Image (cartoon, rainbow, N blue to C red):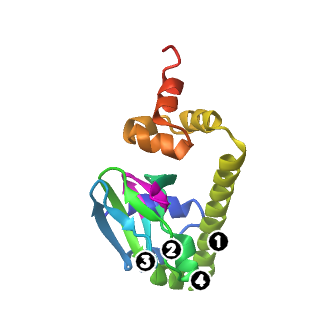
Amino acid sequence: MDYLPLKEYLDNFEKLSQQQWEDLCSILCLRHFKRKEQFQSTGKICNTVGFILEGCFRSVKDLNGEERTFEFSIEHEFITNYYSILTQKPSAVDIIAVEPSVVICADAAKMMALFDSSFTWQKIGRRLAEQAACHYSERLISSFYETPKDRYDRLMATLPNMFLRIPHHILANYLGMTKETLSRLRNPIR
């Protein structure tokens, strides 16, 4: 299996020895997801950590029968429900493939044991946790203090190709606006 993108990603935090890389590879597998297939289901404890090689996923919470997309994950990003893994409580969200996707997967318990096995792995685990905490803090602040147009402008500046990959009604839901408002923002001349 070609896990090289994962190795390159982790090497940005701390260089892995050949043995450390082999230890990680021994707990990895490659999974293919069809469009709309679930990586994680509401009500089940998350036991998988994934690294996306190809594709896109969305994290969704159902609120009184209405879906609310609050996160997207794309190539070379991790995907999991850290809260469920750490607390061993059932997931309150679904993680669903937006498009056909390929993910390097590891059993979460084995990954946590690996993080406890050496200083290098502890450092990588800490850096991944710090990165996730910063990301979720930014997203939380954005959802409370930015207008939907501000969120749209930020998405256009950072990930403009998302508009080609994700159905517009899902993007509008993520941005906290109607699909008609999203259409007006995308085509201001109308």
The residue under label 2 is 17
Q: Which residues are magenta?
A: 51-66
- Please provide percent x and percent y for residue 176: 56, 43
Q: Is residue 60 magenta?
A: yes
Q: Is residue 97 among the parts visible in the rendering?
A: yes
Mark 1: give few (<14), some (14-19) or many (20+) Cα within 10 Å. Answer: some
Badge 1 amino acid: Arg
Disc number for residue 44 = 3
Q: Is residue 183 above or below residue 120?
A: above
Q: Amino acid type of disc 3?
A: Lys
The residue beneath circle 4 is 118
**Mark 1 touching mark 3, by CB under 8 A?**
no
Check contact, mark 3 vs mark 4: CB within 8 A.
no
Q: CA distance from mark 2 to mark 3?
A: 35 Å
Give the label, 2 or 1, closer to the camera.
Answer: 1
Along the line of sight, the residue nearer the viewer: 81 or 159? 81
- Residue position marked by numbered label 1 in the rendering: 126
